[in-house]
Image (cartoon, grey):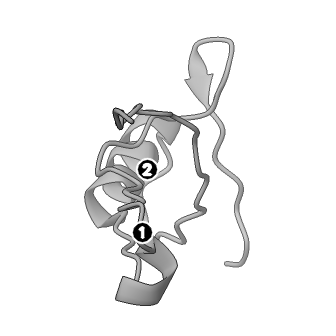
Amino acid sequence: MPKYNVPLTSWANISVTVETDETDPEKIAELAQEQAGVSLCHQCAGKHGLDIGDEWSLVRDGEVPEVYKVED
């Protein structure tokens, strides 16, 4: 019987904490994107080769990226 590989996509989310004196949400978001990085262990990737990718898109409220101050 023939076998087929079928690519399926989904998406994941991360939240990156950025420490900076910058106040411009665009620049803060850029710093977060530069620091974003996750990986899966061999077991989590599983036999199907789960890959979460390496490109992250900003969550935006209209034109402004969502940036939340967590502490001063």
The relative height of residue 46 versus residue 48 in the rendered view (above or below) is: below
Residue at the disc numbered 2: 28
Q: Nearer the viewer, residue 50 or 72?
A: 50
- The reply to whether discs 2 and 1 touch (Cβ–Cβ < 8 Å) is yes
Residue 24 is situated, as x and y percent measured from the top left of the image, at 47, 40
Q: In which quadrant will I find the N terminus?
A: top left
The relative height of residue 26 versus residue 17 in the rendered view (above or below) is: above
For the point 58% across and 38% down, the residue is 10
| Label 2 SS | helix
Within-10-Å neighbours for mark 1: few <14, some 14–19, many 20+: few
Within-10-Å neighbours for mark 2: few <14, some 14–19, many 20+: many
Query: What's the distance in space between the residues labelled 2 and 1, CA to CA?
Result: 8 Å
Q: Nearer the viewer, residue 12 or 46?
A: 46
For the point 58% across and 13% down, the residue is 63
Residue 14 is situated, as x and y percent measured from the top left of the image, at 58, 60
Residue at the disc numbered 1: 20
Q: Is residue 19 left or right of residue 33?
A: right
Q: Decide if residue 19 is in sight here.
A: no
- Residue found at the very far top of the displayed protein: 62
Q: In which quadrant will I find the C terminus?
A: bottom right
For the point 42% across and 69% down, the residue is 20
Q: Decide if residue 7 is in sight here.
A: yes
Q: Is residue 67 left or right of residue 40?
A: right
Disc on res. 4? none
User: If you read the primary sequence from the N terminus, does the residue marked by circle 2 or circle 1 appear first?
Assistant: 1
Callout 1 amino acid: Thr
Residue 43 is situated, as x and y percent measured from the top left of the image, at 46, 87
The relative height of residue 35 versus residue 10 in the rendered view (above or below) is: below
